[in-house]
Image (cartoon, rainbow, N blue to C red):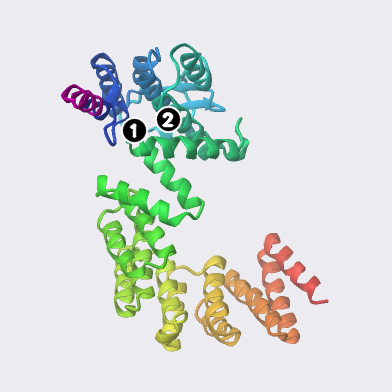
């Protein structure tokens, strides 16, 4: 009896040693781990050619997993993600510089990743690490090539979801695996499952604002508005490298407050965002929306003021359209007309006058006022002729054709 119990314990201990959360390499031997560490050191120093050379032998499933990571994440150029070129970067040089510029690269003439995996599998058998290597490879190709790659989107997602779900159940995963699977579930609108995965990522990597932001998205889509406030705060407190992405964190935090009924804090959040991003018109646009779209927070005067300020930040065709759309969606066409008329008096540049008249014609068409629709589209056409703007003249011609 004791011998049986000891045997079971031994099996459990061995399994635990090879299934360590967040560590795909838990089952690797010492030599393999040293090779992977050497590869990581080269990656940290942006020596990507040297990194791929270290793992290019693909002698076991762990090295193959690392090799495919280097190929898909640190290539200088690739040919349909089957052949890869690498470069040891110099000074402040970045991969973006290399990929978008000109230069010479060392193109690696090795078998395609698919064949490397298949060859190893035929000799040594399958493993979850080998399957993850293929899933990561396919998914990266899908993200970069879409439907223009060698496998269809359906093929890739079917394989990736199967592999990722089994790997996570077995506690064989890393940040890339969970991140890929979380985004797949988010794209499928499977918000409860995506929430679980982004919770895992946020707990493990609490300074990654991207994970907090996407966790907030999953909560908002499930109408867990009050719960979403906390994760949105974390997204704001842990900014991403791209400042525009950090602005998104402020916007979703304001949404969480507003949908929770705390309109005052939503307004304060958006005003704080404007302090940091005073060049972004969307902040004032969202402030206008705050006072148009919630029935128990309607204040047309404040909405008008904020939407007018939007054009003080940026006045172009896209911003004008977005403001008009706020009125058309959440208020009345008459308010959209008033918005155009009063802002035409302050934004007198010829191109803006053309945009206002063009969009006014659309609003008038929506309420059946054909006379004013014709008058404003003719005025818009007249302006764009003077500006020799053929693109907008084509738009005007299309509207006039519909008005015949």
In magenta stretch: residue 3: yes
Instruction: Give the structural element (helix, strand or loop) at label 2.
Output: helix
Residue annotated with mark 1: 172
Quadrant placement of the N terminus: top left
Residue annotated with mark 2: 132
Instruction: State whether residue 205 appears in this view.
Output: no
Instruction: State whether residue 137 appears in this view.
Output: yes
Q: Position of residue 120 (x, y in %)?
A: 46, 15
> Which residue is at a point 72% across and 85% down the rendered structure image?
368
Q: Position of residue 293 (x, y in %)?
A: 47, 79
In the rendered view, tell whether residue 109 sits above or below residue 309: above
Q: Nearer the viewer, residue 207 or 101?
A: 207
User: Are there few (<14), some (14-19), or many (20+) residues within 10 Å of tag 1?
Assistant: many
In magenta stretch: residue 133: no
Magenta residues span: 1-12
Which residue, as the protein is rendered here, is positioned at the far left?
A: 2
Q: Is residue 344 left or right of residue 186?
A: right
Name which of mark 1 and mark 2 comes first in the sequence.
2
> Which residue is at a point 58% across and 79% down the rendered structure image?
328
> Which residue is at a point 39% across and 12% down the rendered structure image?
57
In the rendered view, tell whether residue 395 sits above or below residue 26: below
**Magenta stretch, overall SS:** helix
Q: Position of residue 276 (x, y in %)?
A: 30, 63
Q: Nearer the viewer, residue 394 or 114?
A: 114
Frontmost of labels 1 and 2 is: 1
User: Are there few (<14), some (14-19), or many (20+) residues within 10 Å of tag 2?
Assistant: many
């Amino acid at each position: 009896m004791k011998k049986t119990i000891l045997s079971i314990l031994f099996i459990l201990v061995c399994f635990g040693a090879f299934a360590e959360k967040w560590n795909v390499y838990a089952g690797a031997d010492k030599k393999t781990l040293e090779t992977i560490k050497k590869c990581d050191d080269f990656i940290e120093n942006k020596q990507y050619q040297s990194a791929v050379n270290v793992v290019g032998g693909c002698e076991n499933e762990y090295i193959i997993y690392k090799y495919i990571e280097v190929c898909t994440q640190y290539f200088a150029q690739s040919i349909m993600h089957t052949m890869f070129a690498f470069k040891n970067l110099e000074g402040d040089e970045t991969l973006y510089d290399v990929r978008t510029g000109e230069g010479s690269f060392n193109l690696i003439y090795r078998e395609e990743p698919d064949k490397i995996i298949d060859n190893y599998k035929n000799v040594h058998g399958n493993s979850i690490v080998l399957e993850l290597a293929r899933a990561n490879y396919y998914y990266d190709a899908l993200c970069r090539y879409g439907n223009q790659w060698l496998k269809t989107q359906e093929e890739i997602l079917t394989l990736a979801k199967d592999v990722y779900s089994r790997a996570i159940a077995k506690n064989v995963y890393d940040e890339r695996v969970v991140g890929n699977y979380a985004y797949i579930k988010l794209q499928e609108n499977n918000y409860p499952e995506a929430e679980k995965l982004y919770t895992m990522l946020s707990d493990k990597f609490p300074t990654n604002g991207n994970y907090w932001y996407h966790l907030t998205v999953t909560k908002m889509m499930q109408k867990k508005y009050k719960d979403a406030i906390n994760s949105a705060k974390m997204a704001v407190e842990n900014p991403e490298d791209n400042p525009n992405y950090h602005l998104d964190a402020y916007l979703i935090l304001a949404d969480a407050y507003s949908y929770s009924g705390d309109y005052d804090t939503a307004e304060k959040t958006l005003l704080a965002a404007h302090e940091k991003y005073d060049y972004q018109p969307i902040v004032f646009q969202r402030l206008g929306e705050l006072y148009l779209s919630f029935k128990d927070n309607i204040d047309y005067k404040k909405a008008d003021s904020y939407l007018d300020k939007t054009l003080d930040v940026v006045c172009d065709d896209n911003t004008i359209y977005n403001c008009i759309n706020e009125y058309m969606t959440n208020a009345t066409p008459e308010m959209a007309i008033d918005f155009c008329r009063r802002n035409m008096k302050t934004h007198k540049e010829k191109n803006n006058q053309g945009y206002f008249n063009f969009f006014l014609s659309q609003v008038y068409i929506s309420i059946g006022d054909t006379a004013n629709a014709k008058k404003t589209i003719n005025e818009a056409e007249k302006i764009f002729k003077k500006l020799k703007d053929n693109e907008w003249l084509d738009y005007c011609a299309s509207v006039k054709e519909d008005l015949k």
